[in-house]
Amino acid sequence: MPVGKLDHYSIRTLDIEASRRFYTEVMGFTAGFRPPFKFPGIWLYNGAQYPETTGVVHIIGIDPDDPQGLKDYLGDRDVASLQGTGTVDHMAFAATGLDDMRTRLQRHGIASRERSVPSLGIHQVFFEDPSGVTIELNYPAAEIAPAA
């Protein structure tokens, strides 16, 4: 069987609420169905919900008072390693609504970097989530206001 499209990515965090706010208020995802695992977490969706999809982002909460459920299911990780993307550089999404995203990032005090890739016809926006995971949003180049 060939590998299909990327299904989701997961983030372990000690601050599940900060991640929930970021992915719902900034990215515009919605929290939805999540199986009753023996560790805290949130599954975030972008449109289709379970069973059509398992979500786009899985937030994995770490309960310092009861970490065994997570250790049993996904293995142990040093809490000090839970910052940034490690060897994975960034996660990218195709997007529309560049001006709206700029407004949301500014409203939430999130610094971003932008660049255009004319040969691909896209304009990229890069920023970090509360865990330091770099997000790339690729907008159609036509959304960039023409220079005056």
Image (tube, rainbow, N blue to C red):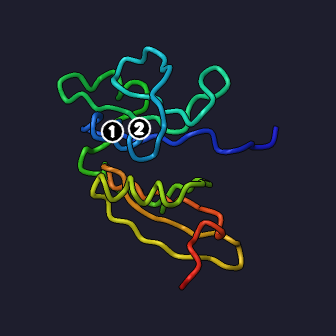
Q: Is residue 138 something that shows in the picture?
A: yes
Of 63 and 15, nearer the camera is 15
Left or right: 110 as drawn, with respect to 26: left
Of 41 and 24, nearer the camera is 24
Decide: is 146 above or below 94: below
Question: Going 28% across and 34% down the picture, which residue do you hit?
Answer: 17
Residue 73, by quadrant, is top left
Q: Where is residue 119? Give x, y as percent.
A: 71, 79
Res 136 label: none
Question: Going 43% across and 60% down the picture, which residue do you hit?
Answer: 102
Decide: is 71 above or below 19: above
Q: Residue furthest top?
A: 36
Q: Secondary structure at mark 2?
A: helix
* Amino acid on which the number 1 mark rests in the picture: Arg
Question: Going 60% across and 62% down the picture, which residue do you hit?
Answer: 139
Q: Residue furthest bottom?
A: 148
For mark 1, does the 10 Å Cα neighbourhood hold few (<14), some (14 to 19), or many (20 or more) residues?
some
Which residue bears the numbered disc 1?
A: 21
Q: Secondary structure at mark 1?
A: helix
Q: Where is residue 129? Give x, y as percent.
A: 36, 52
Q: Residue furthest left?
A: 65
Residue 72, by quadrant, is top left
Which residue bears the numbered disc 2?
A: 24
